[in-house]
Image (tube, rainbow, N blue to C red):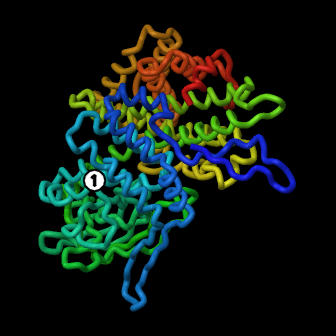
Amino acid sequence: MTVSGHGALNTHEVANQPQPRLSRNFWAEDQPLREQAAHAGADTSVLAQAGHDYGTEQMLHAAEEARRDPPRLISFGRDGRRLDEVHFNAGYHAVMALGAKSGYAALPWEGAAGGHATHAALTYYMAQLEPGISCPLTMTYAAVPALQNDTDLAALWTPKLTARDYDPHIAPLSQKSSATMGMAMTEKQGGSDVRANATRAVRDGSDYRLIGHKWFCSAPMCDGFLTLAQAPGGLTCFVVPRWLEDGSRNTMHVLRLKEKLGNRANASSEIEYDYALAHRLGEEGQGVKTIIEMVHHTRLDTAIAPAGLMRAALSEAKWWVAGRSAFQRRLIDQPLMQSVMADLALDQEAALALAMGCAHAFDGQTDEDRAFARIAVALAKYLSNKRAPGVIYEAMECLGGMGYIEETPMPMLYREAPLNSIWEGSGNVICLDILRTLARAPASAEALMARLQRVLGQDARYDAALQAHSERWPGVPPEAEARWFTESLATLLAASMLLETAPNAVADGYITTRIAGQRGATAGAVSGIDCAAIMARI
């Protein structure tokens, strides 16, 4: 939907300016998503409805308001008592409610086929609407499998986490219609090395009390948090409720909100546990093993989110170049612009295919599915997030000076682009994790190779590249080569998925430019690809 303002001004007539889009349909406008969702077994009826709902004028406005009026920390009440509350704009609550209602956190656990694939596509939508709101919804989704380590805690929390409702009011869990779950792991001295955590857990009857700090705690208004602390038996996972059943506030203090580059609608904080009540999840000393299922599932969302961010940027760029002319021709009709846009679209389609292929494996029931999902999601997270900042920047440049203006979504998308690479393991951490998985989990290595070999014979250039990769690294590579190895392997996996699921113009274009290397170093420095067919899919 578009609507024009008054173009006849006193000094000039406004011309050659595309009319603003006031609403979107994230499903109907996205042919690659419709194809990948079908291949992955997602519920297309759910996605069709959500694609409309996420893109309404009202939701787009709510998301914009959530960014314009960022979260505010209220540490104390007027009476001097601690509150440790974060205030959000009404737009934030509206988008959170939509995500909960659509099943963002619930679908994979409701038993229907294709739950993870449908969830992944909803994450893809949210990345285009307001990516900051994905954080609490993603953690809520990912907490469910980790909670299975304790039947009592699972029975208490899971029904509230998977309720298709949003209940932001401050109250104990038993008094709420739904709940959200966050995660607080990293500390100042350790960062990603959570085994260096210093937060202590001391017994208090059948429960524990936590004393220490967390350097990063996103969405601090969640109803509970999975966290790690040093118990007598070693590093242990705990569930920390935000509000206690007697109506009091748990002694989890929000020290400050982080001033972040992007992700501004979401609150990220530093916290202290001052003898905060905690329930043990899993055995003492098994904290990493317990929480790893939550980390594994959050990785799926950090793999699909860059595809959504790139999609939003490309959609905005195509709308602009289709509605604007320069040098007597529409921008979209100019061959060089076509080369740039098509080249960018190849990375976006690859990211989408990788993530939806991973989601399909998450939905799988076999040991091979699980083994493949473990390695593939790390590869997808690494490659797609490394591609996203460059794609979004080049899409921004397609708008010229307007792409640098906050009235467009481009600055927000550009600020968001690095986040999913940093969250849940930055590039080096992911690469080292991939090496460990291949060394310690031969089933994952076998499942990955089987997937790569499944498309042999379809493209001689792909076949040669896979052979060259295997000859260059017959086993796990040296640590110093981990990034080169990971990039090569992830690019081959993306190509294999495109060969299976995408039209020939896309798969051939990707292999020509990413596998065969027939290209320059910058976006649009390509030749021999079907730009028209690729651009038609944006």
In-front residue for pair 156/46:
46
Residue 446 position by quadrant = top left
The furthest residue to the right: 11
Q: Position of residue 288 (x, y in %)?
A: 29, 52
Residue 364, placed above or below residue 420: above
In-front residue for pair 272/440:
272
Residue 198, placed above or below residue 495: below
Q: Position of residue 364 (x, y in %)?
A: 25, 31
Task: Residue type at mark 1: give it.
Answer: Arg
Is residue 427 visible in the rendered image? The answer is yes
Residue 310 position by quadrant = top right
Question: What is the total number of numbered labels drawn onto the structure image?
Answer: 1
Residue name at image x 54 percent, y 38 percent:
311
Which residue does the numbered mark 1 point to in the structure image? 164
Image side of residue 364 versus residue 219, left or right:
left
In-front residue for pair 217/55:
55
Image side of residue 18 versus residue 176, left or right:
right
Image side of residue 442 versus residue 158, left or right:
right
Residue name at image x 54 percent, y 66 percent:
69
What is the quadrant of the N terminus in the image?
A: top right
Circle 1 residues within 10 Å: few <14, some 14–19, many ≥20: many
Residue name at image x 62 percent, y 17 percent:
530
